[in-house]
Image (cartoon, helix red, strand yellow):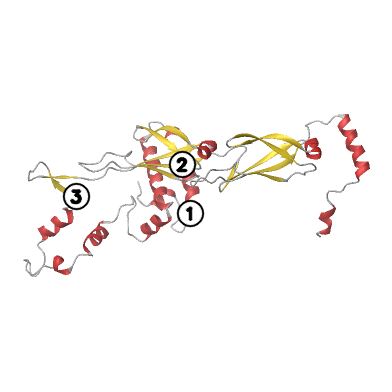
């Protein structure tokens, strides 16, 4: 499998963040483990796509990869690790005139210094054991719109077969990655366990649309409610509320329900905006038609007169 995250996602290195996101979503739908049970090849591809997206979706991490500072797994490249560890040391330590090899430090001491932080004695013995953090485990999760808006708990099966309890925070955004420390692969020796990286896609809702921390929706009202005004029940992401429809509104009129949007991380809530749409019955009876004729003759109203003034 190709290690280049751009090739894994099938995008160019000049791709925008939006193009990367679209490519990722398309591949997730094609390769999701639920669609290919028991197919190890598809599962490996799915994991590679998740890893590539995790690296490229973060602008700073993507810059570091493009600059050659980190590899496709997000790890610091060996030569940079060496540089960071030794660049700050004084010249006397790196080049000891009293040491052998024409004044250079003994190679065995150099390697001992370089790897000494990762190796430690066990029970006082002369042998040394390797300590390293566990690998990260990646998973993609589809979340319902209302679960993401309100917050929820989900139990999912990770690619390695483990069950994982996930807390979805209120206000979760589409494309976010949840990082669950210590829920990934087991560490080596005394190394800590890796993390579970759960990238999230939010399913669209048939009624609500999110705009930042606000919620937008279209609400059908009847002809008489538009003419006479009314108090009607309106759905919100947090439950049903009663809203007043003013007299004489037209389709497209927009009303605001303050504080009925997404609750942001700092506790402030967005608003819900309700766009009204006047809807007539599928079939109009004779009485309604007669009323319309009477009103037409009485009002002589032309809703399109302002259009001609714009030409």
Residue at 83% over, 55% down: 306
Q: Is residue 231 above or below residue 18?
A: above
Seen from the viewer's position, the closer of residues 84 and 6 is 84
**x, y percentage for residue 181?**
34, 42
Q: Nearer the viewer, residue 255 or 216?
A: 255
Residue 261 seen anywhere in this rendered image of the structure = yes
The answer to whether one can see residue 32 in this image is no
Describe the element under mark 3 as helix, strand or loop. loop
- Residue corresponding to mark 2: 200
> Where's the C terminus, which quadrant?
bottom right
Q: Nearer the viewer, mark 2 or mark 1?
A: 2
- For the residues labelled 3 and 1, the Cα–Cα distance comes to 37 Å
Quadrant of the rendered image containing residue 168:
top left
Q: Earlier in the sequence, mark 3 or mark 1?
A: 1
**Comes first in the chain, label 3 or label 2:** 3
Marks 2 and 1 sit apart, C-alpha to C-alpha, by 16 Å
Image spot of residue 192 (x, y percent):
26, 42
Alpha carbon separation for disc pair 3 and 2: 35 Å
Q: Secondary structure at mark 2?
A: strand
Within 10 Å of the Cα at label 2, are there few (<14), some (14-19), or many (20+) other Cα atoms?
many
Q: Which residue is mark 1?
A: 17
Q: Secondary structure at mark 1?
A: helix
Could you tell me if the residues under marks 3 and 2 are in contact, i.e. CB atoms within 8 Å?
no
Which residue carries the number 3 mark?
118
Q: Earlier in the sequence, mark 2 or mark 1?
A: 1
Instruction: Kindly indicate whether the residue at mark 1 contacts the one at mark 2 (C-beta within 8 angstroms).
Output: no
Task: Name the side, left or right, on which 9 lies relative to 109.
Answer: right
Percent coordinates x, y for residue 277 in the rendering? 73, 41
Residue at (54, 38) in percent of width and height: 145
Residue 171 at x, y = what percent? 51, 42
């Amino acid at each position: 499998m190709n290690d280049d995250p751009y090739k894994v996602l099938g995008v160019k290195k000049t791709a925008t963040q939006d193009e990367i996101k679209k490519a990722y979503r398309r591949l997730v739908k094609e390769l999701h483990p639920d669609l290919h049970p028991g197919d190890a090849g598809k599962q490996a591809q799915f994991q590679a796509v998740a890893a590539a997206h995790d690296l490229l979706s973060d602008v700073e991490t993507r810059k570091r990869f493009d600059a050659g500072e980190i590899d496709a797994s997000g790890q610091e490249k060996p030569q940079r690790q060496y540089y960071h560890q030794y660049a700050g040391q004084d010249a006397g330590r790196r080049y000891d005139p009293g040491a052998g090899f024409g004044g250079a430090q003994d190679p065995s001491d150099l390697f001992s210094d370089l790897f000494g932080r990762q190796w430690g004695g066990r029970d006082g013995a002369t042998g040394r054991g390797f300590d390293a953090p566990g690998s990260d485990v990646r998973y993609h999760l589809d979340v319902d719109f209302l679960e993401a808006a309100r917050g929820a708990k989900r139990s999912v099966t990770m690619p390695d077969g483990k069950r994982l309890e996930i807390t979805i925070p209120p206000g979760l955004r589409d494309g976010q990655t949840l990082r669950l420390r210590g829920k990934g692969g087991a560490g080596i020796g005394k190394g800590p366990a890796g993390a579970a990286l759960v990238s999230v896609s939010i399913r669209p809702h048939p009624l609500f649309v999110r705009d930042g921390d606000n919620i937008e929706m279209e609400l059908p009202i009847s002809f008489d409610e538009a003419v006479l005004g009314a108090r009607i029940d309106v759905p919100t992401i947090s439950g049903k509320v009663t809203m007043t429809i003013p007299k004489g509104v037209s389709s497209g009129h927009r009303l605001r329900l303050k504080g009925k949007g997404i609750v942001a991380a700092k506790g402030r809530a967005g608003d819900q905006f309700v766009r009204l749409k006047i809807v007539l019955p599928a079939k109009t009876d004779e009485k309604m038609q007669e009323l319309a004729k009477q009103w037409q003759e009485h009002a002589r109203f032309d809703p399109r007169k302002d259009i001609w003034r714009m030409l």
